[in-house]
Amino acid sequence: MFSIWKSMAVFGLILLPLAGCGGGGGGEAPSTQTTRGAYQGVEFTATTRTTFKLGEAVAVTLVVTNTNSQPFTFDYGGCAENEALVQQQGQSLTFFDSTPPGTYCGGVVKHATLAPGETLTFTQVWNQQILPKAAGQTSSQVPPGQYQIVSGLATEINGTIPSAAPLTITIQPHADPM
C-alpha cells in the first residue's frame, strides 16, 4: 500500500530555512526558474517563481511527458497523480499536490497510464503551511528562508519517485512597519 509519509522520506523534498535570508531590494519583477528530470523515458519539468512573500501561495507547474514508444503505467495513492514533499533537517514535514482543498481520497490506490507522447500538466499549490500529523493539531506557517521543492509523481517505482530536479525558492519576511 502506498504510504505518503514513507514516500515523503524517500522523495526528498527538502525545506531548508537559512538564517539571514530575506528580501533584497525593491520593485524587481519576480523571476522564474525551471528544472528538469527524467525517469524511464518520462520527462519532468517543474517551474515556479524564485521569491514569495511570507504566507503567499507557492504555485509550481509540473509538466510530465512520456517520450517512450510504449505506455508508461504507474500506481498512486490519494486524489492526485502528482505531489511535492517537504523535509526540514531530514524530517518529513508536509506535502502538497494539485488536489482541491477539502478533498479527501485517503486509502485508495489508483492506476494511471501515459500514452506515448502524452503530456500531463499539474498546478501544485503550497500555502506555506506544515500540515498537522495528528488529529486535533493545526497547520503552521513555515518561517522565512530559502527552500527546495521537488515536484513529481505520487508514486514509488523500484525505490525511486520520478520527479524534476529541486527548485529553490526564497520566502521573504513581512516588511517591517515604519
Image: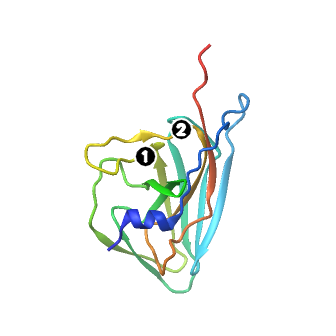
The colour scheme is rainbow
Residue 173 position in % (x across, y down): 59, 31
Q: Which mark is residue 1?
A: none
Quick check: 21 above or below 161? above
Q: Judge from the rendering whether residue 95 lies leftward or rightward of residue 176; answer left or right.
A: left
Quick check: 37 above or below 48? below
Residue drawn at (33%, 63%), measured in percent from left and top? 78
Residue ranking furthest to the bottom: 70
On the image, numbered disc 2 is attached to which residue? 143
- Tag 1 secondary structure: strand
Residue drawn at (38%, 64%), measured in percent from left and top? 4
Residue ranking furthest to the top: 178
Quadrant that contains the N terminus: bottom left
- Could you give the CA–CA distance between mark 1 and mark 2, rounded to whole angstroms? 11 Å
On the image, numbered disc 1 is attached to which residue? 130
- Tag 2 secondary structure: loop
Residue 117 position in % (x across, y down): 55, 77
Residue drawn at (59%, 59%), measured in percent from left and top? 46
Amino acid at pointer 2? Pro
Amino acid at pointer 1? Ile
